[in-house]
Amino acid sequence: MATIKIQQVVSRCGAPATQKRTLDALGLKKLYHIVELEDNACVRGQIRKVHHLVKVVD
């Protein structure tokens, strides 16, 4: 299965609680942390919810 790398590039301070929970669910613990997850519809939906806080890395 294909994977996708996600990096948190903006601080979670000031973000709503639902977006903080989404970052936790993605496994992003701190700023500039990178995680590699399976590329599926569920993960893409979570990325879409916090797209202003993260970026997809090659």
Image (cartoon, grey):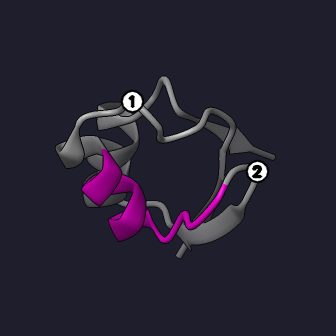
Residue 6 vertical position relative to residue 34 in the rendered view, above or below: above
Q: Which residue is more in the foreground, 47 or 33?
A: 33
Q: Which residue is mark 1?
A: 14
Q: Which residue is mark 2?
A: 32
Q: Which residue is more in the foreground, 21 or 54?
A: 21
Left or right, residue 38 beside residue 48? right
Left or right, residue 28 beside residue 40? right
Q: Which residue is more in the foreground, 45 or 34?
A: 34
Q: Which residue is more in the foreground, 36 or 23?
A: 23
**Residue at the image position 33 percent from the left and 50 percent from the top:** 20
Q: Is residue 15 visible?
A: yes
Magenta-drawn segment: 20-30
Q: Point out the tag, 2 or 1, that comes first from the N-terminus.
A: 1
Q: In terms of secondary structure, where does tag 1 sit? A: loop
Q: Identify the residue at the far front of this view.
A: 14
Indicate whether residue 26 is drawn in magenta: yes
Q: Quadrant of the rendered structure where residue 48 is?
A: top left
Left or right, residue 52 beside residue 45? right
Residue type for callout 2: Tyr
**Residue at the image position 56 percent from the left and 67 percent from the top:** 29
Closer to the eye: label 2 or 1: 1
Q: Residues within 10 Å of mark 2 (few under 14, many from 20)?
A: some
Residue 34 rendering spot, x and y as whole percentages: 72, 61
Residue 34 vertical position relative to residue 10 in the rendered view, above or below: below
Residue type for callout 1: Gly
Q: Identify the residue at the far bottom of this view.
A: 1
Q: In terms of secondary structure, where does tag 2 sit? A: loop
Residue 26 rendering spot, x and y as whole percentages: 42, 64
